[in-house]
Amino acid sequence: MNLEGLEMIAVLVMIVLFVKVLEQFGLIDSSLEDSVEDEMEIATVRHRPEALEHLEAQSKFTKKELQILYRGFKNECPSGIVNEETFKEIYSQFFPQGDSTTYAHFLFNAFDTDHNGCVSFEDFVMGLSILLRGTVQEKLNWAFNLYDINKDGYITKEEMLDIMKAIYDMMGKCTYPVLKEDAPRQHVETFFQKMDKNKDGVVTIDEFIESCQKDENIMRSMQLFENVI
């Protein structure tokens, strides 16, 4: 895969991974019956999520879909929350040939919107709602937030390099055996040549969205997993 073709690999990996997580949790299964049992079980967990009606209003999932999501989430996370170590363990299952620790850390921080060190069912639902049902603008905003590691409103070369190194580590050397050691840095330079319109050394949200919206491949990738559940 050449550097040009890697422009949105982090976004694609992000979405593909969550489809895998849905499968792991048994969430992609429309055969589950609608049941009030799921709502009754909510009271037994350590973290009590908001009423499904409220989440239905906030997200782009139906009540039945939320019940399915909650059942799978509760099965894997009986306490009702996911800490970072558990999050990393989930992702490591899908990349035994590499080290997904750092990339999982970045993703966890993107889902942990209130920065309290855990991902609740509400966090999980709202993130999935954007990734799977959100508009292109919403998905790109989410991706920008992932890249903007320190959340200051800009993507720096250092931040993008950290993201790219994490992706290469996760995929493993057996996936990219011929890549030179400076391949992540080369990709960052390509990324900034395309995204940094005013050449000030940082990429703003407006520059990021404008560049992505002009790329047909990126636009197609944003629609790949809209109907997985």
Image (tube, rainbow, N blue to C red):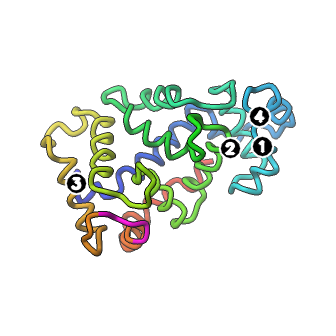
Q: Position of residue 62 (x, y in %)?
A: 75, 52
What is the spatial separation of the Cα atoms under label 1 and label 3, in whole angstroms? 42 Å
**Residue occupying image coordinates x 64% and y 31%:** 81
Q: Position of residue 204 (x, y in %)?
A: 39, 66
Q: Amino acid at mark 1?
A: Glu
Q: Amino acid at mark 4?
A: Arg
Q: Amino acid at mark 2?
A: Glu
Q: Position of residue 162 (x, y in %)?
A: 30, 44
What is the spatial separation of the Cα atoms under label 2 and label 4, in whole angstroms? 10 Å
- Tell me if residue 116 is in the magenta stretch: no
Q: Amino acid at mark 3?
A: His
- Disc assigned to residue 48: 4
Name the residue beneath numbered marker 3: 187
Q: Quadrant of residue 112?
A: top right
Q: Earlier in the sequence, mark 1 or mark 3?
A: 1
What is the spatial separation of the Cα atoms under label 2 and label 1, in whole angstroms? 7 Å
- Give the secondary structure at mark 1: loop
Compared with residue 134, is residue 16 higher up or lower down, i.e. above or below?
A: above
Q: From which residue to which does the magenta span run?
A: 202-206
Q: Earlier in the sequence, mark 2 or mark 4?
A: 4
Exactly how many numbered labels are in the figure?
A: 4
**Residue occupying image coordinates x 27% and y 57%:** 5
For the stretch drawn in magenta, the main secondary structure is strand
Comparing marks 1 and 3, which lies closer to the viewer? Answer: 1
Name the residue beneath numbered marker 2: 122
